[in-house]
Amino acid sequence: MGGRFITFEGVDGSGKTTQLRRLAATLRAAGEAVVETREPGGATGAEAIRRLLVEGEPGRWSPETEILLFTAARRDHVERTIAPARARGETVLCDRFADSTRVYQGVARAGLRGMVDRLHELSIGIEPDLTLILDIDPEAALSRGLARGTAEDRFERFGLDFQQKLRAGFLALAAEFPGRCRVIRAEGSAEEVAARIAAAVMETP
């Protein structure tokens, strides 16, 4: 049996990376072999594409071009990192996956969900076993994201209205896929959020 595939989703600045690392530590302490990865990225070719997507001016790509770039990066990621790790029986924890493309380009940037889903079916063809959607006030998350002061702030610079559309999109996605999505309240201390996530993971086979 292949290893589990768990993804973290949510608006920019919701704490996904921090919580992924905490869950990885918890699972390793319980004896699981864990691979931590991210999107866009997670493999050599995908990381090269990442820089094209998350850096630079907000308007440098059309939504259609973004979908193609994300799908190309995801294909490389699945081939070189996710699928081999699962075949070894390892648990894969991924910071974003196809749900981000469904929400960012399929809803918030443009109404291109159909294009996203068709390309996903043709080129990727897998879904996570469990998706943890970290839900937080978009204004607080945006302040946190911009405060990082990194070059990877292209999507944060679309502004608060964009982040609010993202939140609504992720909550709608959770309702669309209740079998695999769990909405996690991301307010509170990192320890409190980690406890909520651990409980959700324990409840999922």
Image (tube, rainbow, N blue to C red):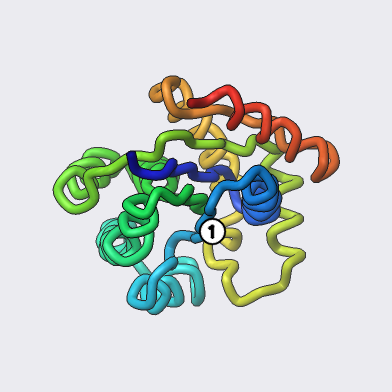
Judged left or right of residue 66, residue 190 is: right
Q: Residue furthest front?
A: 31
* Percent x, y of residue 196: 71, 31
All told, the count of numbered labels is 1
* Percent x, y of residue 198: 67, 34
Query: Within 10 Å of the Cα at label 1, are there few (<14), some (14-19), or many (20+) other Cα atoms?
Result: some
Specify the quadrant that holds the N terminus.
top left
Quadrant for residue 197, please give it: top right
**Viewer-side residue, 173 vs 129:** 129
Q: For mark 1, what is the residue?
A: 36
* Percent x, y of residue 38: 49, 60
* Percent x, y of residue 48: 39, 79
- Residue kind at label 1, given as amino acid type: Glu
Quadrant for residue 158, please give it: bottom right
The vertical placement of 8 against 143, above or below, is above
Q: Residue furthest right?
A: 189
Residue 14 visible at all: no
The vertical placement of 14 against 47, above or below, is above
Judged from the image, the secondary structure of the residue bearing numbered disc 1 is: strand
Residue 4 visible at all: yes
The vertical placement of 47 against 65, above or below, is below
Judged left or right of residue 2, residue 6 is: right
Judged left or right of residue 123, residue 137 is: right
Question: In the image, what residue occupies the spot 32% across and 59% down?
Answer: 84
Question: In the image, what residue occupies the spot 41% across and 44% down?
Answer: 3
Question: In the image, what residue occupies the spot 37% across and 63% down?
Answer: 81
Q: Residue furthest left?
A: 122
